[in-house]
Structures are given as C-alpha cells and as structure tokens.
Image (cartoon, rainbow, N blue to C red):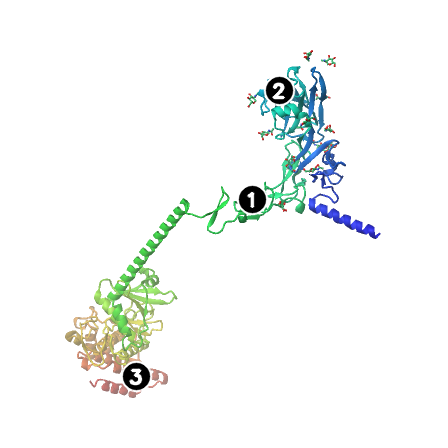
Amino acid sequence: MKVHGVFLVATVFYLAYTQLVNGQRHKGCQTSCGNVTIEYPFGTSPGCYYADDPSFKLTCNDKQKLLFGDNIEVINISHSGELRVWNNVSYACYNNQGNLSDNLYYTYTLANLSLSRSNMFTLVGCNALAFLSTFGTQNYSTGCMTTCNSPSTETGDCNGTGCCRIDVSVPLDSYSFGTRSSRLENMTSVYDFYNPCTYAFLAENGTFHFDALGDLKNLRNVTEFPLVLDWSIGNQTCEQVGNTSECGVNNSICFNSNRGTGYNCKCLEGFEGNPYLPNEHGCQDINECTTNSTIHKHNCSDPSTCRNKIGGFYCKCQSGYRLDSTTMSCKRKDFEWATIFLGTTIGFLSLLLVFSCVQQRMKQRKTAEFRQKLFEQNGGGMLIQRLSGPGTSNANIQIFTEESMKEATNGYEESRILGQGGQGTVYKGILPDNSIVAIKKARLGDSSQVEQFINEVLVLSQINHRNVVKLLGCCLETEVPLLVYEFINSGTLFDHLHGSFVGPSLTWEHRLRIAVEIAGTLAYLHSSASIPIIHRDVKTANILLDENLTAKVADFGASRLIPMDKEQLTTMVQGTLGYLDPEYYNTGLLNEKSDVYSFGVVLMELLSGQKALCFERPQQSKHIVSYFASATKENRVYEVIDGKVLTDNNQREIKEVARIAVECTRLMGEERPKMKEVASELEGLRVAKDKYQSSDQYTEETEHLAGVQYHIGTRG
Ligand SMILES: *[C@@H]1O[C@H](CO)[C@@H](O)[C@H](O)[C@H]1NC(C)=O
Ligand SMILES: *[C@@H]1O[C@H](CO)[C@@H](O)[C@H](O)[C@H]1NC(C)=O
Ligand SMILES: *[C@@H]1O[C@H](CO)[C@@H](O)[C@H](O)[C@H]1NC(C)=O
Ligand SMILES: *[C@@H]1O[C@H](CO)[C@@H](O)[C@H](O)[C@H]1NC(C)=O
Ligand SMILES: *[C@@H]1O[C@H](CO)[C@@H](O)[C@H](O)[C@H]1NC(C)=O
Ligand SMILES: *[C@@H]1O[C@H](CO)[C@@H](O)[C@H](O)[C@H]1NC(C)=O
Ligand SMILES: *[C@@H]1O[C@H](CO)[C@@H](O)[C@H](O)[C@H]1NC(C)=O
Ligand SMILES: *[C@@H]1O[C@H](CO)[C@@H](O)[C@H](O)[C@H]1NC(C)=O
Ligand SMILES: *[C@@H]1O[C@H](CO)[C@@H](O)[C@H](O)[C@H]1NC(C)=O
Ligand SMILES: *[C@@H]1O[C@H](CO)[C@@H](O)[C@H](O)[C@H]1NC(C)=O
Ligand SMILES: *[C@@H]1O[C@H](CO)[C@@H](O)[C@H](O)[C@H]1NC(C)=O
Ligand SMILES: *[C@@H]1O[C@H](CO)[C@@H](O)[C@H](O)[C@H]1NC(C)=O
C-alpha cells in the first residue's frame, strides 16, 4: 500500500511537472520523441491532440522516430502550421544496354495535410524527364526535362543542364502525390561519365544545392530530403470561428491558413510560446535583453542600455543622450535645425514680450508722471504738506484715484449731475462700498478755482461739526481736482425757501431751528475751531438740508483761516452779491463780521421767504436789507414776514428775530453783534418758545436775558 502511495504521488508530480514545463494541454502527454518536441495541437495519445482528430495524431516508434501516419517521419513541427517531414527520392537506373534496371515510382499520401508551396520539384540527371502527379478532386501533373552535352558545360545552376526544378503549384486539396523520372533516350555514349540513374524529388526550397559533377555521379547515396507540409485547425476561417478558436486568449492571434482551409494561431510580436494554449502555458513576453534567440534578441548597440517591456524592448540612453534609430546607439544630444529654429522663435518671442512689457511700463510711468504732475499742479504737494503741518487735528482726508472717481460717477454721466454752480459741477457718486457721496468737480481751466479747492480741503480738514457738510476726500490726479463729500439729500435752504424744492414749505419752528444751527456753526467756526475760520460765502444756496431738515453748511471754497494774532485780513473781495458785506466790499478788510452780515441776510430770507435780491420789489427795496430796514423804520415789520409762518403765537419771536437780522446787517461791522451772541440769542428764543409751548407761559426774563447777552456781545 505504502509503495503504491509513493508511486502515485510521484506520478502526479511528474505529470504536473511535464505539464508546467512543456505547456501541454493535458497531464501525461508525451512532450518529445527523439530530438523532436511534440506540442499541442499535435499529440501521441488521445486527449493530447486536437479534438481527437487523427490528422494531429503522431506516433513515436521504438527507434525514437516520430511518425505521421504509418511511415512519414516528422522532423519538426512549427506552430504557424508547418510540419517538416522526411521525403524519399524516386529514381530510374539504366544498365549499359540502356535497359531500365531499377525504378522507384514513389507515391506519398498527404492524409489531411497539404503540400506547401515552399517546396520545389527537382530532377537530377542527363537527358531525362520527370513528372509530379497529384490526385484529388482534380488530378494534376507537371514536370521538367534536362539535357547534358558535355561534362565541361555542367554548372551549379539547376536550370536545365543536368538538373531542373519547378515550383509546386498543385491543387490545394490533393490527398496524395507521386514522382517519377525516366531517360529520354539511350545514353550509352555518356554512360561511363554520368550516373546511370535519374532522380526526382520534392524538397523544401533551399535544402538542395546542385553540384554538377558530384550530384550527377553520386546522388543515389542520398535517399531523402525535408518536405514541408501545411496543417491547420478545422475547415473554417478565423472570422467563422470567432471567439471559439483554439488560439490562447492572451497575446495570441488567429490567422487563416495558406492551405485555403482552417486557421492557425501565432503569438503577437515580442511574445513566444504555444499560441494554442492559454495563460502561463501560452504566449509569454520575450525578454529581448537576455534571450539567446537571435530572432528575438534586442539590437541595442550597447546591451547595457537594453530594457525589456511587455511585447518589446527599448534602448535607454542616459540623460543628455538620444537614441539614433539607425544604429540603435546613444548619441549626445546636439543642436539640430529644429532646435535652433525653436530656440530662435522662443528667443524672438521673449524679446517681443520683454519689449512690450517695457513699453507698457513706460506708458504706465508716463501716465503716473502725468498724474503726479496734475497732482502737483492741483496743489497736492502743498496739501499734503499743509495737512501734515501743525493744527490739523482732523486730517482724516482720503485721497481717491482717478479711476475710482470715474467709476463712482459712471464716467461723469450727465444724469448724475446734482447741481451746477459757480464753483463747478456736483455729481452724485456711488463708491465701491455702495455709499452715496457728492463729488464736486471744478470747472476746467480755472486756476483760481483750483486754489479754492485746496483751500476748502484745508478748511474742512480743520472742522468737525454736525452742521458742517463732511469732506470725505479728494482726487487731485485729474486735470481739475475733485472733492468728495457726504451726500446730503434734501436740497439747499434756497430751494426750500424759494420754491424749487417739491414738498411742504418750512414751518416757523423749522426756520428758527435752522437759523439756530447756522448761527451755532458760524459761531463755532469763528471761535471754537482750532484756527478761526471765516466762511465768506454764507448764503441760503450754501446751506444744505438733510432728510431731518438739519442744516449743513457747505461750500468753504472762499473761506479763510484767520491766524490767531490777526483780527482781520486784507483780501480780494469775494462773495455773492446780496450777501456781501458792504464794509468789506468797500475796504477789502475781511473779518468775522462779514459772515454776520451774510447771516443777517439769510435770517431775513428765512423770515420773509423772499430772495436776497429781487428786482420785482420797488427800486429802494431791491435788496432785502433795505427792504427790511425800511419796513422796520416804518413799523410795518409784519408786512414783510412770510405769511405762511406768521401765527398768533409767534409774533413776538418773529419780531425778535427780525430785530436780530436787522442788527446783523448794520452797515458798520463794529455795530453788528458777534456770531456767538447771535447764536445764543436765537437759541434763547427757541428754548423760551419750547418752554412757553410746554408750560404755556412766556416770561419777560428770556427776552431780558437775551438783551443782556446782546448788550455784552456788542461791547467791541
Ligand atoms: C538527435 O540529434 C543528435 C544530434 O543532432 C543526433 O546525433 C541523434 O542521432 C538524434 N537522435 C535521434 C533519435 O534522431
Ligand atoms: C525544423 O527543421 C528545419 C530543417 O531541419 C530547421 O531549419 C528548422 O529550424 C527547424 N525548426 C524548428 C522550429 O526546430
Ligand atoms: C522511404 O524509404 C525507406 C527506405 O527504403 C522506407 O522505409 C520508407 O517507408 C519510405 N518512405 C515512404 C514514405 O515511402
Ligand atoms: C535488354 O536486355 C535483354 C537481355 O538482358 C535483351 O533481351 C533486351 O533486348 C534488351 N533490350 C530491351 C529494349 O529490352
Ligand atoms: C482527415 O480529417 C477527417 C476529419 O477531421 C478525419 O475524419 C479523417 O480521418 C482524416 N484523415 C486522415 C487520413 O487522417
Ligand atoms: C526558393 O528559395 C529561393 C532563394 O531563397 C527564392 O528566391 C525562391 O523564391 C524560393 N522559391 C519558393 C517556391 O519558395
Ligand atoms: C485520378 O487518377 C486516379 C489514378 O489514376 C484515378 O483513379 C482517378 O479516377 C483520377 N481522377 C480524376 C478526377 O481524373
Ligand atoms: C543555365 O545556367 C548557365 C550558367 O548560368 C547558363 O550558361 C545557361 O545558359 C543556363 N541554361 C538555361 C537553359 O537557362
Ligand atoms: C539503345 O541502343 C541499343 C544499341 O545501340 C539499341 O539496340 C536499342 O534499341 C536502343 N534503345 C532505344 C530505346 O532506343
Ligand atoms: C556513395 O556511395 C559510394 C559507394 O557506395 C561511395 O563510394 C561514395 O563515396 C558515396 N558518396 C557519398 C557522398 O557518400
Ligand atoms: C468541415 O468539417 C466538418 C467535419 O469535420 C464537416 O462536417 C463539414 O462539412 C466540413 N465543412 C466544409 C466546408 O468542408
Ligand atoms: C543562453 O545560453 C547560455 C550559454 O550558452 C546558457 O547558459 C543560458 O541558459 C541560455 N539562456 C537561455 C534563456 O536559453
């Protein structure tokens, strides 16, 4: 039992071994016979060859010869459909009477194989004739003839003298063939010289080389030549069998047999193995770099550069070297025309790029220089100097760029214009953060306006008051400077008083409050600001109202800063007709009382609802000051008061305010009250009014107090 077990295991191992090594289809198939390797689809035992088809059955005899059929000895088998076998020579020999002494008419059964077209039919002999006959659905016969003249003329070419040969173009379906040869005539005359026999045989092209003297004498010693037979699987084409072919799945392809029936398989280029077997038994990648085969060996000139890859190889050159495909050697990379062309192009392009960059830069610089020039021209330098100088506590002024201004005003669109005045054009602007601003643009080509702009920036930078319109910033890069203010949306006091503003007219309470706010602001400017400021252009058109009707004093273009040590300045007379202080107009001496005069005019406008200058009034009352003066003198103040504001309750207040207005507009500056006094008087009136309204009582005290203040105020 034990012995049996060991034997069994050994057998299994052996079988597994043979299967692995030789890639046979089944365990136990014979893989060689003598020197010949047996591979599927051929085999010696049932199950080892293809489909139990006897066409693929071989036998290995006791002399270790591999036989096909009964007596055809196999030399080797190629996967691509060729079977190489030994083939006998047919002959005819004659005696010295010219009688046929020995003759071999040789026939060969092809079974299911075909004669390959790579065989040739050859006759060796003198004055002889040979035939090749094939048998099949159609019988066929061909032959050739030789002559011999004299021994000296025989040559090595098998072209008719002592030897002839022809291609084998026999019908493909022949199942057997025969060869024979014979003499044409008695050749007794040449008997001694030549071989008495003639030979005819089919042999693989290239296996017989005619040697005139030797072969004509001694060929009889040679009895067999290799013959190529074609084989194929089945009687269908690759297209017909499709996926069901016997070809292995990987790297194996089917091709139609040149027999005209059936197909064969072959490994893809770069692979070797049995194409009729699958996977590891079938086609495998050839390592061209290490193979001993001369057919598949790599052709890299330096073997060390060879690298295998699936289905091929490549020669790997070091960096800086490239492969020369004609010599398969690595050559140092050098400049070629293409490289030079490419290099030149790239160089040219980069030069162009650099040039355009420089040009762009120069253009930008020019623009920047131009803007800087404008900035300087617009007094930017001076402004920065002044802003960084002493006494500028509130220099929170933003410098805007030209682009941002253009964007904010949508390219200074006409629909954005809020107003157009002596000082320039005011646009509504929308900043990137969506805040709305008013942008004031000076008129082009007026250098005095430029000065005014700078002046306004400087003045406003000093002020931080809730009733002064806030300056947010400026832009000096443009040809004319731009000022950016907070946006006050309800128009000017002028508009409200003189009808061009659509909406309810101002009540007396509004007017009084506005008067208080303006007076307070002017008082602040004259005394409280770090450097006293004279507005110089107080008028209803320069007082803006916001949505709560809170007054915002604007337009400081004409304003002046008064140095601490000076009471008044000598300047070019500037202002608006109707509001202009006549004393200042006559002397050119500017002091804070000029603003008081202008404020008086504003008060009168508030009281009367009439314009400062009106040519519809009688000659001597054209100017509101004289209009009021004459009315006061003739004790008919109420006649000049706006009918819309006059009620039973406010007559006293109105009278008081009218009195203040008249005092403010006195001819001599010295006689006018100070702004501070005016402010507190008006404030007093307002407080008293509130008190009166809330407690319903009016006291003389307030009036008296106001009078005292007024009296103190006019001391100088
Ligand atoms: C095998 O080949 C060798 C060398 O070519 C030869 O000597 C030997 O006779 C061959 N064996 C058979 C069985 O054909
Ligand atoms: C088969 O035999 C021929 C002739 O002997 C030889 O040239 C050829 O290389 C052989 N082929 C194989 C695959 O052994
Ligand atoms: C070839 O000749 C040998 C020896 O004469 C013989 O044994 C063999 O059967 C012949 N082959 C064929 C195919 O006839
Ligand atoms: C051949 O030889 C025989 C005698 O050996 C002779 O009788 C015969 O005439 C010769 N010739 C032919 C053509 O057979
Ligand atoms: C030829 O092939 C057919 C079918 O495959 C088979 O039946 C027949 O036996 C074969 N003939 C020979 C001589 O092998
Ligand atoms: C035979 O071989 C020669 C030389 O190799 C070649 O020129 C010729 O075409 C071949 N003939 C056939 C039928 O294969
Ligand atoms: C071919 O030749 C053989 C033998 O001579 C004969 O029996 C057969 O009838 C022939 N076939 C044809 C198609 O002539
Ligand atoms: C045979 O070849 C020889 C030498 O090349 C030449 O002289 C001769 O004419 C050729 N004969 C024929 C029939 O082609
Ligand atoms: C061959 O020659 C002999 C003698 O010269 C002659 O008798 C015989 O008839 C010839 N044979 C043929 C077939 O011509
Ligand atoms: C052929 O045989 C003869 C006699 O048997 C012999 O003398 C001759 O050398 C042989 N030739 C070759 C090439 O073997
Ligand atoms: C192919 O062979 C099969 C049997 O092997 C046979 O039945 C069939 O008729 C053949 N077809 C052709 C076209 O020869
Ligand atoms: C190649 O040949 C060498 C020596 O001839 C041998 O040692 C080696 O095993 C062979 N390699 C292959 C893959 O056949």
Q: Residue at x 71, y 33 (%)?
A: 73
Report helix, strand or loop for mark 3: helix
Extreme residue toward the right, this view: 1
Q: x and y percent of residue 518 in the render?
A: 28, 76
Question: Quadrant of residue 195 in the image?
Answer: top right
Callout in the foreground (2, 3) = 2
Is 324 in front, or is 617? Answer: 324
**Number of numbered tags placed on the structure image:** 3
Q: x and y percent of residue 312 in the render?
A: 57, 45
Q: Is residue 28 above or below residue 361?
A: above
Is 641 in front, or is 702? Answer: 702
Q: Which mark is residue 471?
A: none
Q: x and y percent of residue 187 in the render?
A: 65, 16
- Amino acid under disc 1: His
Q: Earlier in the sequence, mark 3 or mark 1?
A: 1
Q: Earlier in the sequence, mark 2 or mark 3?
A: 2
Would you name the residue on which mark 1 appears?
298
Q: Which mark is residue 684?
A: 3
**Mark 2 → mark 3, Cα distance in angstroms:** 155 Å
Question: Quadrant of residue 679 in the image?
Answer: bottom left
Q: Which mark is residue 146?
A: 2
Q: Is residue 206 left or right of residue 335?
A: right
Q: On the rendered image, what quadrant is the C terminus found in?
A: bottom left
Is 103 in front, or is 319? Answer: 103
